[in-house]
Amino acid sequence: MFSIVADANIPLVSQAFQSIGDVVVLNAELITPEVCREADVLLVRSVTPVNQALVSRSKISFVGSATAGIDHVDQDALGQQGIHFSHAPGSNADSVVEYVITALIQLSTLKARPLGGLTLGIVGCGHVGGRLAQRAPALGLKILKNDPPLAQQSADEYVDLHTVLTMSDIVTFHVPKSPDTYHMITEAELRSMKSNAWILNTSRGDVLDNRDLKAHLSRGELEACVLDVWENEPTPDPELLKRVTFATPHIAGHSVDGKLQGTMMLYHAVIEHFGLQPSWDHQQGLQKDLPSPLSIPPQSNWLSVVARHLYDLESDDARMRNILCVLEDQMASRFRDLRRNYPPRRSFHLHTLKEVPREHLRAVRDGLQVHYLYPKERRN
């Protein structure tokens, strides 16, 4: 049997791996070199820096991160010790897309500005940005895509960053952490955007220079700003937090199903690496506590009401702003608690609407991707 150390925020990790070995489940801050010393397998999320200091005196042979991003993992250090590494690319992509779509619908209501005809600039078109580009047109949005690496490999139409910033009504970022994306948006880039533009960031906090963004917002030069990620997490700038339209604690990808998908991907990676036979059925977790069918009466803001039922962004925003009520030295702990104790949020495709007004069919079917019972012409 293997000795497995796992982050407590990986859903169903004990159930998944108990047939493989003895699973020690810990909060991320308790995963130390001493804890790892006798472990064979280490399973983490993005808040645990995996580096030489953590694993050099251990007998770990496999490290897995139940996340799409890998900037918290020093793969060179793992390679030097012959430690196999695996992660979960795309596992939470739909969750992030659903967060962005919800934010757009709620901003549209809040600002009394219909989405139809607006231009959405997507910076980074990988797992998340690519899916968003497919779903957002159902809301009436025009799409501009920027992704230099993909532009060299694909026949799809891409534009440069300057074009996205100057031509878009809304700009959303879905890029990895790298030297190329560090502070890719500073005061100069912000000045090039439309004065009534909306900006969203669910990728990495330092993609946007937070100091420049705060100054820009203080002058009222953007109509709306949605931030799920922050420089210096888990201690975001309080003044910036006060100025953004919606603020959340790095939870855009935290749907139950997105996180469970990450667990499943790591489980199969461990099974394959050690040549074991699978015995865990992750579908049982996915089918547990499914949402009840929704019936939303026709009303002027029907789509916004539906979006709020699917994902209550305003409640996440309110919980995040409560950080402002604690002492500065307690902010990091509160931020971590918000992530660790995040309320269950299910993927949109697991919801069912009893009836959809015909004018919202495309938005529900292709944008939200929610099942519905009526009208009958639902496309499979």
Image (cartoon, rainbow, N blue to C red):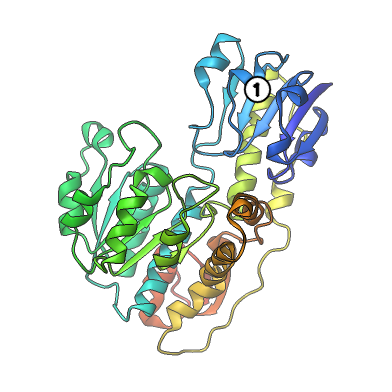
> Picture coordinates of residue 141 (x, y %)?
27, 65
Residue position marked by numbered label 1 in the rendering: 54
- Corner quadrant of residue 182: top left
* Residue at x 61%, y 38% (from the top left corner): 45
Nearer the observer, 48 or 4: 48
Element type at mark 1: helix
Please determine whether, in this image, residue 15 is positioned above or below residue 289. above
Residue at 74 percent of width and 40 percent of height: 13
Viewer-proximal residue among 134 and 354:
134
Quarter assignment of residue 263: top right
For residue 201, side relative to residue 347 (left or right): left
Whole-percent x, y for residue 275 in the image: 70, 18
Could you tell me which quadrant the N terminus lies in? top right
**Whether residue 283 is situated above or below residue 102 in the rendered picture:** above
Residue 114 appears in the picture as rendered: yes
Q: Residue at x 65, y 22 (%)?
A: 54
| Residue 270, above or below 13 | above
- Which of these two is toward me, 302 or 356? 302
